[in-house]
Image (cartoon, rainbow, N blue to C red):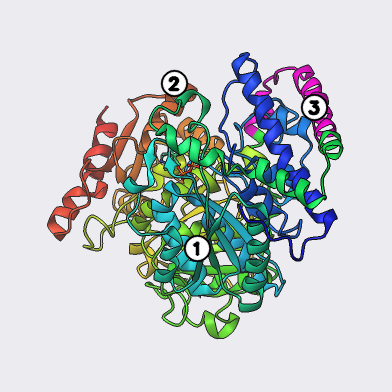
Amino acid sequence: MQFDRSGFSDEKLLQLYTELVRPRMIEEKMLVLLRQGRISKWFSGIGQEAIAVGATMALDMDEYIMPLHRNLGVFTARKMPFDKLFMQWQGRKEGFSKGRERSFHFGANEYHICGMISHLGPQLAIADGIALAHKLKKENKISLAFSGDGGTSEGDFHEALNVAAVWGLPVIFLIENNGYGLSTPVNEQFVCKQLADRAIGYGMKGITIDGNNILEVNKTIAEAREYCIKEQKPILVECMTFRMRGHEEASGVKYVPKELFEEWAVKDPVSNFEAYLLKEGVLTDAKIEEIRNSIRKEIEEGLDKGFAEPPVTPNTAEEVADVYAPAKAVITPPANGNETEKKYIQAISDGLRQSMERNPNLVLMGQDIAEYGGAFKVTEGFVDLFGKERVRNTPLCESAIVGTALGLSIKGFKAMMEMQFADFVTVGFNQIINNLAKIHYRWGQNADVVVRMPTGGGVGAGPFHSQSNEAWFVHTPGLKVVYPSTPEDAKGLLIASLEDPNPVMFFEHKALYRSISGLVPDDYYSIEIGKARQVQEGSDISIITYGAGVHWATDYAKHHPDISFDIVDLRTLLPLDYDAIKASVMRTGKVLLLHEDTLTGGIGGELAAWIAANCFERLDAPIGRCASLDTPVPFAIELEQNFMAKGRLHQEIEKLVNY
Ligand SMILES: Cc1ncc(C[n+]2csc(CCOP(=O)(O)OP(=O)(O)O)c2C)c(N)n1
């Protein structure tokens, strides 16, 4: 292995050596503990340490890194105390995630590390968001994200690189090409010659280097950093290395030919660097002993503290409370009483515009939302008001944009992403469900992101432009799900969603956009998330509903004055307003749960269970559910009408009346 020490002082070389040895020694100790049955699982990075350490030490301490499961060297080079790290791995409360996350699936803002989720690829787009924050603030900083060779096959890899290239984001994408993805060798993973060649397809620079040579890694990443800052562009760096152990210790290494281990053992990053420094006279045997003894001591002390720490005692209230970032329940009333008649869509646009005026750190992203004004024109004229930096057309890549929104949030920005249609959320699903929703519970980082979801049918748009998919998100702790039915609520709730530090899925019914009007306060105001609206009080039948269902119910009530309806517009589906639900049931004793979403697994089922458990004595009839057919949403208008819950409303109400 050829080392080139030009530009490296003796002091720097010693520092690199110490940081390189530390993860190796920790891992060797962990492998012993694993064999003794004192720890449960270990993903080894032995043989790859030069990449994590060399890269981390080329960055400023306040530049974010998105590491993966083999990058202990990132955590140690960022000076995370070993005892706390060990407690993290052991699931202790004093670790970095209060015992909620395993191994390296955690982050810590004081160390500028954003933790991975198991899905690997989603890390990359978070780096885009962080780099975008640097770019918007004109800071000379970069972000760095890791991927394995296996991870490069994920769509998230492609999307993140493409966004970074198109937007000119200072990101270093670093591939650790260690020959295997679990048991899959690289020739079954990709057929390009080098993974760095993929950079060409994204219009960015790509280089391949020896990942086992710490000086080469450190120098390359330092230069890449300068390049990203100066050119305001991303770069792809592929580090060739080898995984000297199994995917994780239990998986074994039977699938790897023995010769490969022999070939790569000779290229070991630690022993080669040590030998080089001895030859250069930078290290002596005594100095090596001194460094290793000091690390050994640190490990032993950390283990003593870690093993002494008792297992976590569950506190259910704390577990539940930490799912969400604390949200100030400040409700802003409009400053004056002026109101204007507005369509539902205008009210949304109004709320968004006023939020942009109030929050200079709010960034809007979505397909065609800039000059074109969005598929439904919600952001028409916004570019002129706020500029293209804050009103951003995105490439067609929902997953990367949700990830970018999270990256922005980590840097203190607020982000709104417009799904062109709610149906397309499926391709951004993982980032929403697993990153946005869980991140606060996992390691205390919030996701200050609103995803706007033009939803619903009734407009003859077929199976992929008509779905009601709110129930998918209601089932995900950590999200808030808001679904207004009137212009006034749409504006006030959108403002509240943008003020809320938590991720909010904001559903806007497309069929209401231009069909519903109402008086809307002119000023900025917010409406509390989690509070239902009593549309009308009555004594015969409760209709508990939301979205288009509110209009179906009120229309029905208008045409049936002989029945006294109590209509509740839930407005927020997560968290639900159980007080309002209960109060309504208490007034009537007969309940119909109405939604446009399909029946099975819809929110009506959850509400029915809750009402049965909490209002049983007051019920005078079985709880009714009126929902759409359990089929995809058909295109032909006759079929769609047949699909829609609305067509069965009369029949379901009759059942309750006649019970
Ligand atoms: C989306 C997803 N699919 C499958 C897995 C299971 N899995 C975990 S690690 C891994 C291999 C990753 O290989 P690579 O990206 O090369 O990283 P390495 O482990 O070699 O460092 C797989 C398939 C996963 N974590 N996420």
Q: Which is the main secondary structure of the residues drawn in magenta?
A: helix
Residue 580 at x, y = what percent?
53, 39
Q: Is residue 606 left or right of residue 85?
A: left
What label sits on residue 616 in the rendered view? Answer: 2
Mark nearest the camera among 3 and 2 is 3
Q: Which residue is mark 1?
A: 417
Can residue 384 be seen in this snapshot? yes
Is residue 198 located in the magenta-colored stretch of the structure?
Answer: no
What label sits on residue 524 in the rendered view? Answer: none
Vertical relation: 2 (above or below) 307: below
Range drawn in magenta: 292-320
Label located before the other in sequence (1 or 3): 3
Residue 275 at x, y = what percent?
71, 44
**Three-letter code for the amino acid on which mark 3 is drawn:** Gly
Can residue 497 be seen in this snapshot? no
Residue at figure coordinates x 46%, y 28% from the top left = 610
Residue at figure coordinates x 76%, y 41% from the top left = 80
> What element does badge 2 sit on?
helix
Q: Which residue is mark 3?
A: 302
Residue 355 at x, y = what percent?
62, 69
Residue 231 at x, y = what percent?
61, 78
